């Protein structure tokens, strides 16, 4: 899932370097400049004009005026991902999820303290 897949269903975005820009689709913001930015790398968005920002779920909740479960369902329709994949990605903060195990010797002493707590 990418935020870009979701946003493109609501507003036309234009690539600018490694970012994507558009007029803000927030119904409460009458934007006529490209103040809305999509950050594909972090799977997030932010409007510098009105402060509307977040991830795919927050975007859908605002655009569709719906609750969390309805937003997840809408994202599954747009992206083709399962609900569990979307929830896992949201919980990981939009970062790429790896199924690789980490070797304990690669964890720093401070990291070991955090894990043990």
Image (cartoon, helix red, strand yellow):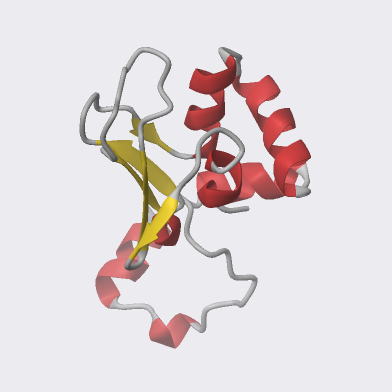
Residue farthest along the bottom direction in this orientation: 105
Q: Nearer the viewer, residue 8 or 104?
A: 8
**Residue 40, horizontal then vertical, whole percent:** 44, 57
**Residue 32 at x, y percent in the picture:** 29, 28
Residue placed most toward the observer, 65 or 30: 30
Give the number of callouts.
0
Q: Is residue 16 above or below residue 44?
A: below
At x 52%, y 78%, the residue is 102
Image side of residue 16 versus residue 44, left or right: left
Image: 73 above or below 113 = above
Q: Of 98 and 17, which appears nearest the observer?
A: 17
Identified at 53% across, 50% down, the residue is: 4
In this image, 109 relative to 86: left or right?
Answer: left
Q: Quadrant of residue 49?
A: top left
Pick the residue in front: 21 or 32. 32
Q: Residue placed farthest to the left in the image?
A: 49
Residue 54: image x %, image y %? 39, 36
Residue lying farthest to the front in this orientation:
32
Residue at left offset 51%, top offset 84% = 103
Q: Quadrant of residue 61?
A: top right
* Residue 103 horizontal side relative to residue 75, left or right: left
């Amino acid at each position: 899932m990418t935020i870009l897949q979701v946003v493109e269903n609501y507003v036309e975005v234009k690539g600018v370097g490694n970012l994507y820009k558009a007029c803000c689709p927030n119904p409460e913001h009458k934007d006529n400049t490209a103040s809305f930015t999509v950050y594909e790398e972090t799977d997030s968005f932010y409007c510098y004009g009105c402060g509307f920002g977040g991830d795919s779920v927050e975007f859908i909740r605002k655009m569709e005026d719906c609750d969390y479960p309805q937003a997840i369902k809408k994202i599954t329709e747009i992206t083709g991902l399962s609900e569990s994949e979307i929830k896992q990605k949201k919980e990981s903060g939009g970062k790429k999820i790896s199924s690789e195990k980490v070797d304990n010797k690669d964890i720093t002493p401070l990291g070991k303290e955090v894990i043990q707590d």
